[in-house]
Image (tube, rainbow, N blue to C red):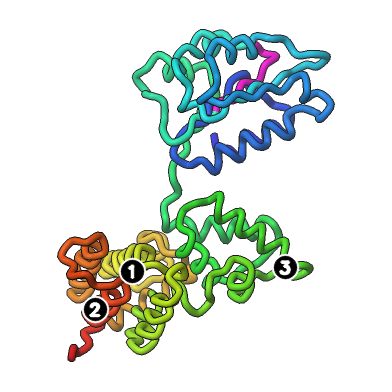
């Protein structure tokens, strides 16, 4: 059951006694906990019937005692245990989970990892609780997620703008949402988010960013790539090499997969390689500039330069020097 389904049930006053939210993706866990804290009880009832615990400071006995209390002048009470992964003797909650009260809605947020599936606690949760296990979103799913988030709120955003945000921020869904909410606040009556908005309100240059650099490489535009490196050298937060190299590696890995697929059908490429449909043409255009064998060499070169960034086989070159060397190798430009 996805988090959205749980929240939909709550909105319809459909409750279970115990909810165990765990896993590597904190965004969805926080989404459910935030809703539960703000909306499961009417404001007038929260003072008496909402209890919050934090794992680092919580004692298991206090948590169980709170769960066993009866609501005050209400039908339900809510007990939320945040950061449960930091609580000592977490398995002691088993005694309550095995026999929960129907008048208590007990919500546990257990981030970063899952409970050991072999444990008695995990077995009890499977039969007695609603368990949601979240996973980090794959990078290739981020553009679709951003597009969906924006569309659901009645706004529009270009594919290029989406990719600029994703490449710069990565798979931190909470931060992406915060930045998008910031954009919405500043849009006024407009419904279209542009690259100009991203530059003005998020601070990501529309001309000098990891996506545009990747595009320059894909087009074999050597002057543009060098110009961008010079900008990055003076504006190190714009696109650090630690961001650029993974971006390039992901791009050429997908290009490599397209060659292996042996298909020119855009829909099939998007589906099987994991590329947003609006970006497929960027990859097929790059395939005209880089052969299958060359892409193999490029992937090896990026790996080698990634090692140089962390000091292996690097004779004190700056990040800009390393990027320039790599671009020369990728584009087969002559060296002086």
Numbered marks: total: 3
- The residue depicted at 74 percent of the width and 33 percent of the height is 39
Front-lying residue, 87 or 31 = 87
Q: Quadrant of residue 2?
A: top right
Q: Is residue 72 above or below residue 135?
A: above
- Distance from label 3 to label 1 (Cα)? 32 Å
Q: Earlier in the sequence, mark 1 or mark 2?
A: 1
Residue 65 placement, left or right of 220: right
- Distance from label 1 to label 2 (Cα)? 14 Å
Label 3 Cα neighbours within 10 Å, binned few <14 / some 14-19 / many ≥20: some
Residue 248, label in figure: 1
| Disc 2 versus disc 3: nearer the observer | 2
Q: Quadrant of the N terminus?
A: top right
Q: Secondary structure at mark 1?
A: helix
User: Residue 64 location in percent, x, y?
Assistant: 58, 11
Residue identifier under label 3:
187
- The residue depicted at 36 percent of the width and 89 percent of the height is 223
Q: Secondary structure at mark 3?
A: helix
First to last magenta residue range? 101-108
């Amino acid at each position: 059951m996805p988090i959205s389904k749980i929240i939909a049930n709550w909105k319809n006053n459909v409750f279970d006694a115990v909810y165990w939210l765990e896993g590597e993706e904190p965004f969805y866990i926080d989404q459910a906990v935030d809703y539960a804290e703000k909306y499961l009880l009417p404001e007038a009832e929260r003072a008496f019937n909402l209890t919050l615990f934090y794992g680092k400071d919580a004692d298991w006995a206090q948590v169980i005692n709170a769960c066993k209390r009866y609501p005050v002048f209400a039908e339900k009470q809510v007990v939320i245990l945040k950061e449960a992964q930091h609580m000592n003797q977490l398995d002691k909650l088993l005694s309550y989970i095995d026999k929960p009260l129907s008048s208590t809605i007990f919500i546990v947020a257990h981030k970063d990892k899952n409970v050991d599936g072999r444990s008695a606690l995990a077995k009890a949760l499977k039969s007695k609780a609603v368990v949601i296990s979240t996973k980090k979103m794959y990078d290739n799913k981020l553009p679709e997620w951003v597009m969906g988030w924006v569309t659901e709120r009645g706004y529009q955003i270009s594919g290029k703008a989406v990719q600029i945000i994703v490449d710069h921020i990565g798979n931190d869904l909470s931060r992406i949402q915060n930045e998008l909410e910031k954009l919405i606040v500043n849009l006024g009556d407009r419904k279209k988010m542009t690259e100009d908005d991203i530059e003005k309100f998020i601070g990501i240059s529309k001309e000098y960013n990891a996506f545009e650099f990747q595009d320059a490489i894909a087009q074999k535009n050597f002057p543009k790539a060098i110009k961008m490196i010079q900008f990055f050298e003076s504006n190190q937060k714009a696109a650090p090499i630690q961001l650029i190299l993974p971006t390039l590696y992901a791009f050429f890995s997908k290009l490599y997969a397209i060659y292996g697929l042996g298909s020119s059908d855009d829909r099939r490429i998007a589906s099987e390689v994991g590329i947003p449909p609006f970006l497929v043409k960027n990859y097929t255009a790059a395939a005209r500039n880089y052969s299958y064998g060359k892409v193999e060499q490029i992937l090896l070169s990026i790996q080698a330069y990634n090692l140089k960034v962390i000091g292996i086989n690097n004779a004190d070159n700056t990040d800009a020097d390393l990027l320039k060397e790599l671009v020369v190798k990728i584009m087969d430009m002559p060296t002086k």
